[in-house]
Amino acid sequence: QVQLVESGGGLVQPGGSLGLSCTVSGRTFSNYAMAWFRQAPGKEREFVATIAWSDLGDGTLYADSVKGRFTISRDSAKKKVFLSMNNLRPEDTAVYYCAAKAGILTAEKARYDYWGQGTQVTVSS
């Protein structure tokens, strides 16, 4: 089993910045993908960003809505994944979830087997 715990959510004004982190524990794989998804009230959970976690490198993929504003990164030694969010907008308000899967990265949420409990991000003045 893989356990994921998110932290770093909060309230921020439009145009501001916020960072999220996800700590990974338990069973891990030699090659897997870590991702961030988000779910706003009344909406489906949607893909935000993903990063490959393997000896072959750390390729990334972003949703169009966050490209150029959000950055996903990882610290292998500390078993953490980060989401740096800049120029935040009210429409970024959501619960943000960390997710993990074995194998190659993908934006398809159904392919992720492990999920954190989520952390709230609210963008409001």
Image: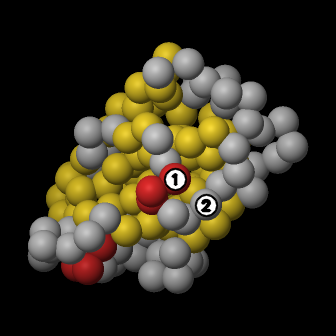
Question: Looking at the image, do the residues carrying marks 1 and 2 touch, with CB atoms under 8 Å apart?
Answer: yes
Amino acid beneath label 1: Arg
The residue shown at (40%, 76%) is 87
In this rendering, position of residue 97 left or right of residue 83: left
The residue shown at (25%, 47%) is 119
| SS at circle 1 | helix
Query: Quick check: can you spot residue 123?
Result: no
Position in image of residue 11 (x %, y %) = 18, 59
- Mark 1 and mark 2: span between their CA atoms? 8 Å
Q: Residue furthest top?
A: 26
Position in image of residue 120 (x %, y %) = 21, 53
Amino acid beneath label 2: Thr
Position in image of residue 25 (x %, y %) = 49, 21
In this rendering, position of residue 12 left or right of residue 21: left
Residue 124 sits above or below residue 80 on the image: below
Position in image of residue 60 (x %, y %) = 68, 60
Q: Nearer the viewer, residue 55 or 93?
A: 55
Q: Residue furthest right?
A: 56
> Mark 1: few, some, or many residues within 10 Å (few <14, many ≥20)?
some
Residue 111, numbered label: 1
Task: Please identify the quarter of the rendering in which residue 15 is found.
Answer: bottom left
Q: Which of 60 and 29 is in front in this view?
A: 29
The residue shown at (26%, 39%) is 117
Which badge, 1 or 2, is on the more N-terminal residue? 2
Residue 106, numbered label: 2
Q: Check the picture and name the quadrant holding the C terminus.
A: bottom left
Residue 15, numbered label: none
The residue shown at (37%, 68%) is 46
Query: Total of numbered circles in the picture?
Result: 2
